[in-house]
Amino acid sequence: MVNLSTLLRDAETALAPLLDGGAASAGALARGADLPLLGSLLGPDDTGAVPTGASEVSRADAFTYAALAGVPRLAEALGPQATGVVVDDDAFAVAGTYEDAATGFRAVQLRSFTDGRTVFSVDGTNFGSVADVVADLDLARPQASSPAFAAMVADARTAAVVEGREVVFTGASLGGALVQVGGYEAAEAISAASPGYAGRVTVFGVDPLGGRDAAEALNGGRLDPAVLDRMNALHVRTEGDVVTRVGSHLGDTLTFQAVDAAGNPVLLSAQEAHVNIESLLATLSSDALFAAGTRGEPGEIGGLALLANAFGPGLSDAFADGGLGGAFDRPGPARLPGGGAFDPTGRFFDLDADTDGDPDLRVLLGGAVPGADELLIA
């Protein structure tokens, strides 16, 4: 019988500091020193990025999708009172949620009020959730195999085939790996149901963990070029981020110089670079900074993927066989950033994620949020 505690300890020793953005270990990795077995881990990944039919997203849409990547955490904190989201001139209704306590998977379906888009926003890692950490260490495979994930893909197929809507997947970090898999599965389902469907499934990842391994695991180790051609997948990352270098991706990647809120170049540690909201939103708000992004797969850390493939499946099986998913359910709603504020009338919550004084996203509220003051981080 697999010893879960031993597997978790060994796997976390090898990978968790990197996925958690630990400053010391991630910084050492970036420098190429100070980690056990590091010399054998820095080799190139034998499985590079997989091209998709297109890898193009406008700057304005990239800003919107990056902001929407945070909606699952906001919706979890605000509860059913969160009924809609506004980003710039785009407004979306919160149309449904997907959650699987056993694996930690969580996502939100958003439907545009202004055009035909349906956006599936997939949550990233909650490090208070052991299930999420296990999913990280197994390169997202447990969550990509969950019933809630399958329900999301089925709804994406219906939105495209039955309702004729454009389908978009967005997510950061772990969520960024899962949207790659979700985009592929949705494109495959749409193709099977409607071979003449002309649109592509858009996938947008923010500093994503690699999604190729999980996608291949669901498809017998092989990805269909015809399905990949039905995807438009683009990912954005900040220079220095390490998580983006763990595993390989479906689609292309834009790497940006780290900047402050005013758009001035700054030097960030590996910990600070991962999903750095200030830098990302400043970049995605500027035509010049967006155009300066460098296109291409970031340098892979092949040994880390090998470790994940060696440790991850056994760890996931032990976690599932032990029935520990329910026992390690999410600890409760995440607290909201201190850069946010509730409207005194209870109609909306404004999130200023980069604390530059301008709200980045407004959550429409269908009623008062109990204990709202306790959700804010001072």
Image (tube, grey):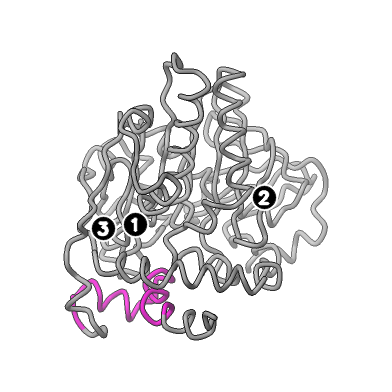
Identify the residue shown where x is 75% and y is 52%. Answer: 79
Q: Quadrant of residue 241 in the image?
A: bottom left
Type of amino acid at the residue the image marks with label 3: Glu
Tell me, yes or no, whether the highlighted magenta stretch contains residue 277: no
Q: Earlier in the sequence, mark 2 or mark 1?
A: 2
Answer few, some or many: residues within 10 Å of disc 1's Cα (few below 14, many 20 plus, some between 14 and 19).
some
Q: Position of residue 76 (x, y in %)?
A: 68, 55
**Element at badge 1?**
loop
Identify the residue shown where x is 79% and y is 53%. Answer: 369
Identify the residue shown where x is 43% and y is 57%. Answer: 173
> Which residue lies most toward the front here?
1
Query: What residue is disc 3 on?
Result: 239
Q: Which mark is residue 260?
A: 1
Q: In which quadrant of the rendered image does the C terminus lie?
A: bottom right
Answer few, some or many: residues within 10 Å of disc 3's Cα (few below 14, many 20 plus, some between 14 and 19).
many
Circles 3, 1 touching at the beta carbon (< 8 Å): no
Q: Position of residue 221 (x, y in %)?
A: 35, 48
| Magenta part of the chain | 11-33
Query: What residue is disc 2 on?
Result: 75
* Marks 2, 1: nearer the viewer: 2
**Element at badge 2?**
helix
